[in-house]
Amino acid sequence: MGTSTRSYTPFLAFLAGVITTCALLAQPQVGIRHSSTNFKRSAVQDLAERAEPWVGSTEVHSYPPTNAVNYDPTLFPSDVGFPGPTPTGAEPALLATAPAYPFSSPDQGLLVVPKEFSSNKFPLLKKWGNLSPWYSNPIGTFGVETGPAAPESCTVTALHLLHRHGARYPTTSNSATSPSSFATKLLQTNGNWTASGNLAFLNDWTFKLGAEILTPFGRHQLLELGVSMRLKYGNLLKNFTETNTLPVFRTESQDRMLASALNFAIGFFGYPFDGQYEQSITIEGAGFNNSLAPYYACPNSGVATIGGRATWFVNKWANIYLQPALKRINSLISGFQFTISDIYAMQNLCAYETVALGYSSFCPLFTEEEWDQFDYSFDLNFWYGSGFGSPVGRAQGIGYVQELVARLTKTPIETYNSSTNSTLDSNPTTFPLDGRALYVDATHEVVIINSSLFSLSQILSNTHGLHPVLTALNLSTLAATGPLPYDHIPERRSFITHEFAAFGANVQFQLLSCACTPGDQIRVILNDGPVPLSPLKYCPDDSKYGMCPVDDFVRSLEEIIQETDFAWACLGNYTLPDGDAWQTVTGDPPAKPANYTP
């Protein structure tokens, strides 16, 4: 018994010391004056509240280990045989068999929204422009009365799917508004400041974001998208069994693009996917034509006053809407003062940390109104940078439109005068034109806007992809309310980036055969929202289903291709004034002078 009592003595002594220390800390102390107040406090209190000198430093957890001591693939093979019975079943065709359509939510049950927004149902995840996770647009979003399910008496015969990559870390940037620049700025202060209130987390905050590559949530998005498309369109694979061929999917060589495509494939085909499809990996880089990364073939997209003209509008807007937040957040810190760029970076950090880490303490710093205003900054950026308000908007998307027409007509591209790659597109193996029932292409959001809408819009975070396609398709319903002002949010606007260019965004070109309608039909479905095709010259006004005869759709696009001067838009020597002194709502550059010579 005595031995047992003695064994507890060190612990009891330690516990008594902890209690005494806590009691002393709870008592008022004198003798230490805080540098920015008249309150007296203890050294312990001062140290607890002052920022750590390493605030803003980058925290990296490198996984997997370089040389794990227990790595032995011979003892842990991925296949040991003995799989058991493996009979397959019928392919799903949810669009034809289910009484309802399964719509997707932005968080997919994985992200946490601060209670300040979740309690009153404010859709914070939808307020981050192209940094929002994709979600299903409600029926009627773009003016079509019905949803993405095939209309009655119609059967889906083919699908051309264009999708954006999943959620990623920030792109590499030296911009003052980038998350990494904000972190570096804090680190350079050596913690000579104190944050309080709901900014107190910044006192020991570290930068935990990588760059460029997919986050875990981004990987999940594309896996889920692949599963979703298999459930809806799996029956189209019968076409390949009957023709003894495999689908050819395309993506780019950039890490997040390849990872997105492979995660989609795992979702669509399951593991292992070898032998179930062909993955074309096109080079994304200078000197290579690529319709899924057209900016490399369009030098003017990198000219500050042409492809970068959106910066003027976004800067003007940020300096208006962020003034209240600047004053409010600066009141929560002593010894340091933030700038407008810092406040904008904090909003970016809310979005990026959420899709990378699952939650961000930066989010509650801002009001609902300020999140609406942040969202609008992306509309300005994409409208003027790569969409309907950009002089290179249509040109950057026209390459994909040429490829879409070639696939729909089963006819090779005759003239390579845009971002298309003649080596790959002229080869029937890498670019098949035999009427296959399924095509899947992975791209960036700027390309979707350039190619699919013909008048949609590059953003501060250096993103590319969906916008050019939407612009080049002349889906000008998205541009119906015209140029966007930089000094206020219009009461009604048709161009809302998070509706069509979010992480994982997708465009379904749905081909249909309908018993009551002659000829093959096509619909364009943007994040599960059908888009009216009536802006296309030869397409009817079908507000109920958004359908257009394929022949009329193709004829409309062929005229758009003929009217697009890629060489002038992307290579021409023209200048534009800053700001709104010059406008376009078609994604075209100013008219080429009659006497112009390259």
Image (spheres, rainbow, N blue to C red):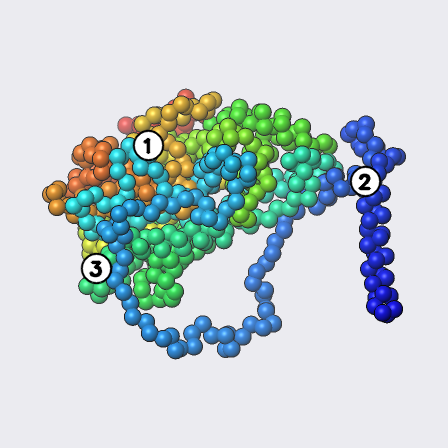
Please tell me how many numbered marks the rendered image carries.
3
Q: In this view, does 348 lie above or below 584?
A: below
Task: Please give the label number shown on residue 142.
Answer: none
Task: Please give the label number shown on residue 26.
Answer: 2
Q: What residue type is labelled 1?
A: Leu
SS label for mark 1: helix
Image quarter of residue 237: bottom left
| Residue underneath mark 3 | 239
Q: Which residue is drawn at 67% across and 28% down?
A: 331
> Which is more toward the observer, 262 or 44?
44
SS label for mark 3: helix
Q: Which amino acid does label 3 sit on?
A: Asn
Dot 1 or dot 2: first in sequence order is 2
Q: Is residue 408 left or right of residue 371?
A: left
Could you tell me if the residues under marks 3 and 2 are in contact, i.e. CB atoms within 8 Å? no
Dot 3 or dot 2: first in sequence order is 2
Quarter of the image for the C terminus: give it.
top left
Q: Is residue 88 left or right of residue 53?
A: left
| Residue underneath mark 1 | 478
Place of residue 578 in the rendered image (x, y in percent of width and height, measured from the top left)? 45, 25
> Which is more toward the observer, 325 or 400?
325
Marks 1 and 2, how far apart at CA: 61 Å
The answer to whether any part of residue 451 appears in the image is: no
Q: Which residue extends farthest front?
A: 1
